[in-house]
Amino acid sequence: MRLSAQTPLPASVRAPGYDRAAQAAGIVHIGIGAFHRAHQAVYTDDAMTAGDRDWGIIGVSLRSGDVAAQLNPQDGLYTVSTRSAVGTRLRLIGAVQKVLVAADDNQAVIDAIAAPTTHIVSFTVTEKGYLRRPDGSLDLAAAVGNPSLYRFLAAGLAARKAAGLGGLTLLSCDNLAGNGAVLRRLMREYLAACHPDLSAWFDRACTCPATMIDRIVPATTDAHRAEVEATLGARDEGAVVTEGFSQWVIEDDFAGPRPRWEKVGAELVADVAPYETAKLRMLNGAHSALAYIGLGKGHEYVHQTIADPQIRPVIERLMVGEAAPTIDAAPGQNLAAYADALLGRFANPALDHRLIQIAMDGSQKIPQRWLETLAWHQARGARCPSLEAAIAAWIAFLRSDHPVDDPLAGKLREAAAGPDAMARLFGKSGLIASDWRPA
Ligand code: CS2
């Protein structure tokens, strides 16, 4: 039997504490993968259980029909399994109402963005989904293509303006440095080129808060789905698995109403930068290093790699000795304690987080995870042995038999193969342009 609104739940599985059918959709989320379902959708579900109303989520996949096929036959319902050494907890999330596939039905997405009940459009489209050129500017040719988030946003915003509706909060939940500002700048570039009539209204009516989002979400496997089915007594094709830890820091800059996420664990702050920088350079920086160094040594999972006595000290030094000194901590932000907590999270034996999942899209991740730290130290005449080892491991990965899943895969492999790999990959005119120049 497939999970649906009619499925009787076992007592151990927590259910949404509100009338799902009575909620309007207040959020359109673009890029409804496992990460969104284990993170922002959970906070929103909690906010509605705590009494907020009309924050249902309409999920959008830009291309793939997979998530729509998983969730739509289940009335949008799915489970989140929280896994740790002490066991697994299961809960049912009701915040997602349906999933649209943009490539199949452009107009449905535009209508959802333009609906009077919609106040927030949020995004987890991954680093490459922002369609940036190596210098950070918008790749306009890609952005006018179908389906791109910019096209849908512009069409939806144009309809709102024409109908005399208010603007929207555009909430980027991707691992980019200054994600809100990046989205605002790219959207402005798109509007200036394609909809100049909308530019001034966009600046006046819409905001793009910065966010730091954090929860480790490994890709769901068939074994996970079978485990969920055994507990639930129903088949959940949309199941997601994650750790107990979750953090969401949001810049308090909304264009209109929002769920009271701060009542259910999110932090609304004036400046996200210290949290975001720490997360990108320490957590994600360590993750990418674990991935390439670990794969080079034949490991498969994060928890195995952090237990390797030759690798663990490299990762500790990367976080504490190399990344932490570059961060201007906020009052009360303890970076040493943060590094300790991260080591504990990486060691979670129940997550089975595959290194190859993190190794994907290196060209998009490495700049904010490693290169900014390297440039900071280089400007002060210092070296970063751990990050340099990570760079060497990435190049070895590009030269290896591992599949390279990256929008620049072909060019990267070619550049990495030659004796001048470092110069072709890095520096001002490298494939991943950076202020850091290899020695
Ligand atoms: C990971 C992240 O796959 C990756 O690149 O580093 O997805 C990481 O698990 C999350 O950012 C944790 O919040």
Image (tube, grey):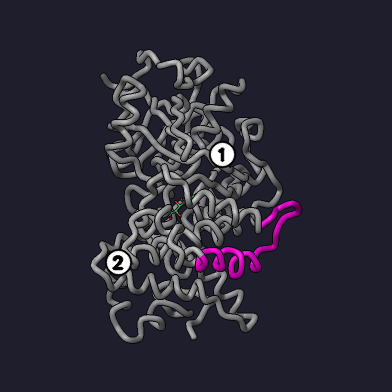
Q: Which mark is on residue 396?
A: none
Overall secondary structure of the magenta section: helix
Spatial CA span between label 1 and label 2: 36 Å
Residue at 49% over, 53% down: 191
- Residue located 49% across and 21% down the image: 16
The location of residue 290, given as percent across then percent down, is 43, 61
User: Residue 409: which numbered mark, if any?
Assistant: 2
| Residue 83 as seen in the image, left or right of residue 340 | left
Q: Is mark 2 within 8 Å of ligand 1?
A: no
Q: Nearer the viewer, mark 1 or mark 2?
A: 2
Residue with the mark numbered 1: 168
> Is 356 rendered above or below residue 32?
below
Q: Nearer the viewer, residue 397 or 77?
A: 397
Residue contact between numbered discs 1 and 2, judged by CB atoms under 8 Å: no
| Residue 407 higher or lower than 386, as above or below | above
Tell me which segment is drawn in magenta: 313-335
Which sits earlier in the primary sequence, circle 1 or circle 2? 1
Residue 27 colored in magenta in the image: no
